[in-house]
Image (cartoon, grey):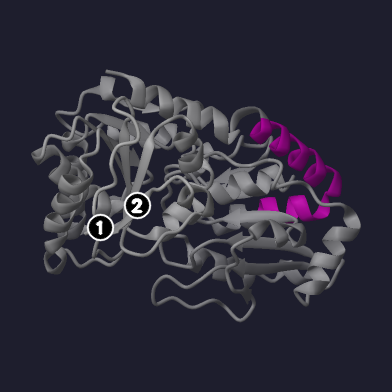
Amino acid sequence: MPELLPRKLDTSKRILFGVTDSVTLKFLMKGQLEWLAGRGYEIFTASNGDFESPLLKNLQTQHIRIDMTRSRKFFSELHAFKEWASAFKTVRPDIVVLSTPKASLFGLITACALRVPKRVYLVRGLRYETEKGLFKTVLKFCEWACLVSATNIITVSMSVEREVKKFPLIRSSKIETFGLGSSNGVDSTRFQPAGDQEKKNAKRALGLDADDIVVGYVGRISFDKGVECLNELSEMKGLSENRIQVIAIGSFDDKVALSPMVKHFDSVDEPELLFPAIDILILPTRREGFPNVVLEAASCGIPAVVTDATGARDAVCDSITGFIVARGDVSSMYFHIRELARNPRLRCEMGEAARVWVVKNFQPERLWIAYDEVFKRP
C-alpha cells in the first residue's frame, strides 16, 4: 500500500472512488475526477488494474490496486475485504463513491464497518436481472447489502431507481437520480453529427459500401447485451433487399459468437471516429443501468432502436429520438429499422431531435455539480 500523502488543506475533503475494473475510471468517468479535484477535493481511486490520468497526476493523487475480477467468483476473492480495509485505513477518506458489483459489495460493507462518514453507492445497473434461481437470489441479497451499507444511493436512471425502491428496509429519502439520468453525461463537443461525405468515407474505411444503411451495435458482445437478438436480426431476409448492413463494434465478454451476417470490428478508445459510419444504432440489451452509447450516438445525430430493459428505455424518447421495443422482440426491431432505412427524412428528423435532447439534458458539468452538492451535504 503506498504511503499516505499529507492533506493539502485541513478543510479539504478526501474522496475515494472505487470500481471493479479500471476501464470504468478511464471511460465512464472521463473529466469528472479532474473537475472535482479542481473544486478542492483530494481524489483517490481504487480498482483491480492500473489507472493514470495526466491531469490528475499533476494533482498528486494516488491509485490503489485491489485484487478483484468481473467474474462470478466470490468466495475466492474474499481477501478483497482485507484490501479495502487497508485502503480505507491508509487514505482515511471523508467520502467513498463505489460502483460496479464487486467493488460495491466489498467496499461498501467494509466502509460501513469502518464508519467512513459518507458512503455513496452509485448504482450503474442491477446485475441480478438476467439471472435465475439460487444465483439470482444471492445476487439480490448482495445488492441489498450494498444498499443498506450506503448513506447515499445515486441511481443512473429513473427505471433503476424504481427497481431499487422495491428493496425492503431502504429509505427512499437516501435514493436519488440526477436529472434524467446517466452517470457522467456526454460531451456534445466531442460527439458531433457528421456530414454526408464524412459518413461515406467512414463506411468505406470499414470496408462497407458507402450507400449501405448501416445498423450498428457498439459495446460488449455478450448474452446480457442481447447478442442472440442481434444475430437473429442480421439473418432476416429483408435486410439485403433494403441494403441494410448490421455491424458490431466491441469485445467479446463471454462465450458467445456472432452470426457471419454481422460484420465485427474491435472496440476502440475513440468511438466518435466510428459513429459517422452508423446510420441507426441498435441496442437489443436484456439489462442496463443507463447506456452511454445511446447518448453518444444521439449526440452524433443517430437515432436508436433499443429494448425496454431497465435503463435502456430511459435513453430514448420513443418515436421522437428513436424507438423502444420489448426485450427479445426481433420482429419489432426489424420493423423499425426497415422504417428508418426506407425513410431518410425520418432518420434525419429523429437524429436532430436526439442531438437537441442530449445537449439540453446530459451535459457532464450538470451532473458533476449534482455530485458536488451531494458531497457537500452534512
Mark carried by residue 282: none
Q: Marks 1 and 2: CB-CB under 8 Å?
A: yes
Give the residue pinned by disc 2.
62
The residue segment tinted magenta is 335-359
Q: Position of residue 151 (x, y in %)?
A: 22, 29
Up/down of 117 relative to 296, above or below: above
Image quadrant in which the N terminus is located? bottom left
Asked which quadrant contains residue 138, the reply is bottom left
Query: Of callouts 1 and 2, which one flags the residue occurring earlier in the amino acid sequence?
Result: 1
Q: Position of residue 179 (x, y in %)?
A: 50, 26
The residue that appears at 64% across and 60% down in the rendered structure is 270
Mark 2 falls on what kind of element? strand
Give whichever of 183, 65 is nearer the camera. 65
The residue that appears at 16% across and 63% down in the rendered structure is 74
Q: Left or right? Give the position of 302 relative to 129.
A: right
Image quadrant in which the C terminus is located? top left
Asked which quadrant contains residue 40, the reply is top left
Q: Position of residue 6 (x, y in %)?
A: 28, 41
* Membership of 345 in magenta stretch: yes
Up/down of 169 relative to 160, above or below: above
Label 2 Cα neighbours within 10 Å, binned few <14 / some 14-19 / many ≥20 = many
Q: Main secondary structure of the magenta part?
A: helix
How far is the residue under mark 1 from the one under mark 2? 8 Å
* Membership of 199 in magenta stretch: no
Give the residue pinned by disc 1.
2
Callout 1 amino acid: Pro
Q: Residue furthest bottom?
A: 260
Q: Position of residue 343 (x, y in %)?
A: 83, 49
The residue that appears at 16% across and 41% down in the rendered structure is 111
